[in-house]
Amino acid sequence: MEWPACTDEYEKLVIRMSTPRVVIDNSVFSSATLVKVDSARRHGILLDAVQVLTDLDLSIKKAYISADGKWCMDVFHVTDQNGNKITDESVLKYIEQSLGSIHYYGRTNSSNGLTALELTGTDRVGLLSEVFAVLADLQCDVVEAKVWTHNGRIASLIYVKDSSSGSAIEDSQKINKIELRLRNVLKGDNDIRSAKISVSMAAMHTERRLHQMMFTDRDYERTPILEVTSDSPVVTVQNWAGRGYSVVNVQCKDRTKLLFDVVSNLTDMEYDVFHATINTNDDRAYLEFYIRHKDGTPINSEPERQRVIQCLKAAVERRASEGVRLELCKEDRQGLLAEVMRTFRENGLNVTRAEISTVGNMATNIFYVTDAVGNPADSKIIESVRQKIGLSNLEVKELPLIYHQEIQREDEAVGIGGAVLLSIGSLVRRNLYNLGLIKSCS
């Protein structure tokens, strides 16, 4: 372990005591890799662990969380996107090292010398086309970006560099010009108050920041402008007065990064997760959390309960991908993204989510598109757009498949129980059994 500068022996001892113990086992199940983390409890520690796994695009099929006093035990059953165990030694080593350092160092994504633009406002057809047209006009190259839309609102985190110098944009006059023009685009005709833009050089985790931006924008309170078709998540919140916990249950369609999205929002709302069980079955996910506020109290009012329900529904829905998935792979050049977005707009396509990235000299972008009112886009329009952009450059892709192996029987064979736990006592016993610390969970 590499010690920070000026670390004395006492500090090293403290670091060793608080360093999580990580065990990765591929021998327990044929269908999933078992990842166990024992660590000192602190606010956000569960999110940091889940973030390590989801940043590698791993699927968390099951999880058992239990915290007692100052310590917590997390058990995850993970696979790759194809439903297979993790066998790559370099990946396994990275997981072990990353989880082993989350308590002391934390985790963020660096902006890598780029300028970060944060935008929130009212979503509308063609908005992104206008945003990227402005950036192209101001000689800003988009290196990476993520865009989410939900309930008629849009949040975007865009990393740009100066077209001439290839470096971060630091000139205050140019930054002011970017802010002014983008703010005018976001305002449109009817969003004078809620449109927001900020420029930053700070390091951040993109998806965590998008959740925070939409949470601050209070998207969970708003009425959607575009029609949505996804299965709506079911969220319930009840208090267990005898133990001082609030019990949160979430049932919804399973997808990648679902646990990250829910835990991220619980953390941002300043709740601590003391116990949890996560199960997936076919294409459904069942999540149960025993939580308290950071001050140690459960949810204590009906308005707070309703707010938690609204916020967690929003957390699930923001990443739910509406529409046709289009993947663009084309040699990058100045103004390419603005041209692609203009073509979408001119053909009446609305972008509900986007992931923009540049690898070397190639632009590799993912777009989810619907028609102007949120219905599936007409296949003829999609083909017309592909003809204009390039059939070999813009391809129609199915949504990523979430593979669910039949692991319920395996779980039962080794004594790991089913879905929702009925009491905190059985929850803790099951978690201890999963860790091999007791011989029976009955």
Image (cartoon, rainbow, N blue to C red):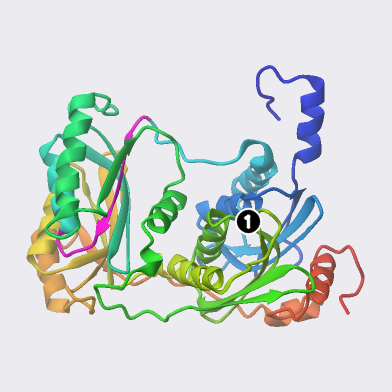
Left or right for 413, reference 371: right
Total count of labels: 1
The amino acid beneath tag 1 is Thr
- Tell me if residue 213 is in the magenta stretch: no
Q: Position of residue 383 (x, y in %)?
A: 14, 71
Rendering quarter of residue 263: bottom right
Left or right for 219, reference 330: right
Q: Position of residue 376 (x, y in %)?
A: 23, 78
Q: Position of residue 189 (x, y in %)?
A: 11, 58
Identified at 82% across, 24% down, the residue is 10
Image quarter where the C terminus lies is bottom right
Q: Mark 1 points at which residue?
A: 87
Residue 181 seen in the figure: yes
Residue 30 seen in the figure: no
- Helix, strand or loop under label 1: loop
Magenta stretch: give its range. 113-126
Image quarter where the N terminus lies is top right
Identified at 77% across, 40% down, the residue is 18
Identified at 45% across, 41% down, the residue is 204
